[in-house]
């Protein structure tokens, strides 16, 4: 896809990765609207990209639909959706508080699904079928990990849903599932519950962002982590 002039909604723009992604898209010439929960950081990144911010908590289905509608109004349409939201939790599977499990799935799985559903009709309006959805799941979708059972399950469910979405809408818009390894964004320092176990050395978030931009431009389907080569792979 040609990003110059593209109209893109970035959800999770107040997070480290989301903010970098919004900036990278603007650098490519895209027009970007950002959402987030932190009003202070949201105002800063929105000012940097030159559009009005949209405050959003993705656990609210109606708010997700309203955020997409607001972005469409600002941009005059929608060519792309980037979802860079997520929250971790750690601890043994049998000890997980049901409320924690519910919030993990609300944020990591159901929220992105709601956003894509709201955005899909607008993306499908393009005559060239060159719109895109790019969603951050995680390496946990490929490698479910001890002490992260529910976290892994929420990301696996999202990845499976994106796979079906891609097949069902292959003639309408591209679907990119981004499954990076542990990153240097500090996400694991703010879990819903528990303490992170020993994790591998983090990959720089900027590497993921640069790879996502290339993958979107190529109309790719997946970004995965090759543990042997220690690099991201676009397919």
Image: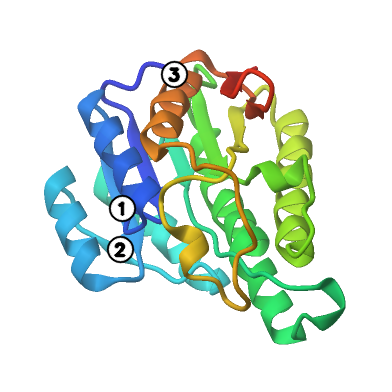
Q: Could you tell which of marks 2 and 3 lies nearer the N-terminus?
A: 2
Residue density around tag 1, few if under 14, some if 14–19, many if 20 or more, within 10 Å:
many
Which residue is rendered at x = 58% and y = 55% of the image? Answer: 112
Which residue is rendered at x = 49% and y = 28% of the image? Answer: 131
Circle 1/circle 2 CB separation < 8 Å = yes
Residue at mark 3 to residue at mark 1: CA–CA distance:
20 Å
Whole-percent x and y of residue 182? Answer: 56, 45
Quadrant of the image for the N terminus? top left
Q: 186 or 154, which lies in front?
A: 186
Mark 2, residue position:
54
In this rendering, would 43 be left or right of 79? left
**Quarter assignment of residue 171:** top right
Q: 193 or 109, which lies in front?
A: 193
In this rendering, would 233 be left or right of 203? right
Whole-percent x and y of residue 75? Answer: 27, 43
Q: Secondary structure at mark 2?
A: strand
């Amino acid at each position: 896809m040609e990003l110059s002039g593209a109209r893109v909604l970035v959800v999770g723009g107040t997070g480290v990765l989301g903010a970098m992604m919004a900036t990278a898209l603007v650098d490519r010439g895209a027009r970007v609207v950002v959402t987030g929960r932190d009003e202070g950081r949201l105002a800063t990144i929105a000012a940097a990209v030159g559009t009005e911010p949209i405050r959003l908590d993705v656990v609210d289905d109606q708010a997700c639909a309203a955020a997409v509608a607001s972005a469409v109004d600002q941009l005059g349409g929608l060519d792309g959706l980037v979802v860079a939201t997520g929250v971790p939790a750690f601890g043994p599977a049998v000890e997980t508080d049901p409320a924690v499990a519910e919030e993990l799935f609300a944020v990591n799985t159901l929220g992105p699904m709601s956003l894509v559903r709201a955005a899909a009709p607008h993306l499908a309006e393009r005559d060239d079928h060159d719109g895109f959805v790019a969603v951050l799941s995680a390496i946990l979708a490929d490698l479910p990990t001890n002490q992260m059972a529910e976290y892994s399950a929420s990301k696996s469910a999202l990845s499976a849903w994106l796979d079906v979405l891609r097949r069902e809408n292959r003639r309408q818009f591209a679907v990119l599932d981004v499954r990076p390894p542990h990153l240097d964004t500090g996400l694991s320092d703010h879990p819903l519950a528990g303490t992170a176990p020993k994790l591998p050395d983090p990959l720089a978030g900027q590497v993921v962002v640069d790879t996502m931009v290339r993958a979107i431009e190529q109309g790719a389907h997946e970004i995965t982590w090759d543990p042997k080569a220690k690099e991201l792979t676009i397919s």
